[in-house]
Image: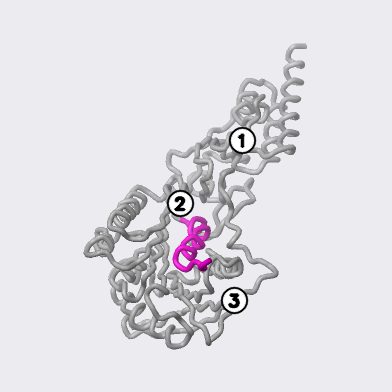
Amino acid sequence: MRRHLSKILIYLTILLAFQCKHDRPISQKDETNVTSFAGLIESVNLSDSTDQYALAEDFLDSLDAPYIEEDTNVYFFYMGNASIVQVAGDFTGWNPTGKNFTRLRDTNLWYRKEIFEANARLDYKLVLNGSNWILDPNNPNKIGGGFGLNSELAMPGYVQPEEIESRENIDKGSVSKIRISSTATGKTYDVHVYLPASYDEANDYPVAYFQDGSDYLNLASSKNVLDNLIADKRIVPTIGVFVVPNDRNIEYAFDDRFKYTDFFTNELVPYIDSNYSTLARSASRAVIGDSYGGNISAIIAFQNPDIFGNCGIHSGAFQPNDFHTNGIVMDGEQKAIKVATIWGSYEGSSLPPNMRKVKDYLIETGYDVEWKELPEGHSWGLWRATTDDMLEFFFPLAN
């Protein structure tokens, strides 16, 4: 009789938790602990009933993963047959080693607890049996990256970037493709040029130059960002120049970085100024890039402050050539450059401290600096959500 009563009480507890899940956000704390993932696991571990295992699996199967409690506690879970389940992502350096899930007794439920900042946003994948990398089947939220789709963990305090979405009922700019051959590099570059909806050859416009042009357009939705910022009068109407590299590693960080700089400053900028109505002055030009693109953007601006008066560094990967770019940025007299630098705290062991070092130097030297360090990884999720910060810093619409 006592065993049947215990089974009924556990069943009612799970049923009540299931109902509570539909009545409020899963991340909200329940003072009775009914919806606690830890409480659910404890109930299953203490029960001898195989029916209880099925109830637990049914309950979790109705949830979106990861399961968030108390704003910072995160439970990753997977239901299925496997010999080992792991998680890899921004917070592991994309290495699943040591991030094993626990199997709940003899059920097919696997789980792992992590703790993150309340406003963190991270990319991840599950790894089955040591080699099968998959999107989290219980997580509907996905985000594009340089290597395809990842599952996205957005904590309760994270605010999704509305400015990346295409909006109805606003004037929208146009994007056209041109090709430019370079004497400096001996290569031909695809360049996408964004013209604001109000573009008029009788007026002159500032220009934002982007490295990794296709990625800033496709993964960072930069056309939408420009359209929305201009429509909301958060920036002046701005031309966008999105340059597609041929070999980004060589051109942005290694052997051809100075040849590429020559192409950018001596060939690309004069071409844009000759063919479009631009404000041909350094204060009205910005160069923006991500990772190695941030590296080359810093080289271009700090070696040519008379051409580029604004430099946007998304997670600048200055590590190549024994941090040679540090010397370019941090040596010599202060230059007339505004710098926006944004990076994530989950970007490995060397990038965040170096970005802090560079940022501190720039501020102490008297540069006009806008900076952010956010609980995110080295990903387009971070860069697409902060492109607006850079553009507003460089080209704000005067009141």
Q: Main secondary structure of the magenta part?
A: helix
* Mark 2 closeness class: few <14, some 14–19, many ≥20 residues within 10 Å: many
* Secondary element type, mark 1: strand
Q: Is residue 366 above or below residue 154?
A: below
Which quarter of the rendering shows the N terminus? top right
Which residue: 33% across, 60% down? 367
**Residue 114: x percent and y percent?**
51, 37
Give residue 109's mark. 1
Magenta segment range?
Answer: 379-399
Q: Is residue 22 visible?
A: yes
Disc 1/disc 3 C-alpha distance (Å): 50 Å
The numbered mark, 1 or 3, whose residue comes first in the sequence reads 1
Which is nearer the eye, 127 or 235?
235
**Which residue position is annotated with label 3?**
173
* Secondary element type, mark 3: loop
Disc 2/disc 1 C-alpha distance (Å): 28 Å
Disc 2/disc 3 C-alpha distance (Å): 31 Å
Q: Is residue 124 above or below residue 164?
A: above
Question: Which marked residue is nearer to the observer: mark 2 or mark 3?
Answer: 3
* Amino acid type shown at disc 3: Gly
The numbered mark, 2 or 1, whose residue comes first in the sequence reads 1
**Residue 352: x percent and y percent?**
36, 50
Q: Is residue 384 magenta?
A: yes
Question: Which marked residue is nearer to the observer: mark 1 or mark 3?
Answer: 3
Give residue 377's mark. 2
* Amino acid type shown at disc 2: Gly
**Residue 204: x percent and y percent?**
48, 81
Which residue: 62% across, 36% down? 108
* Mark 1 closeness class: few <14, some 14–19, many ≥20 residues within 10 Å: many
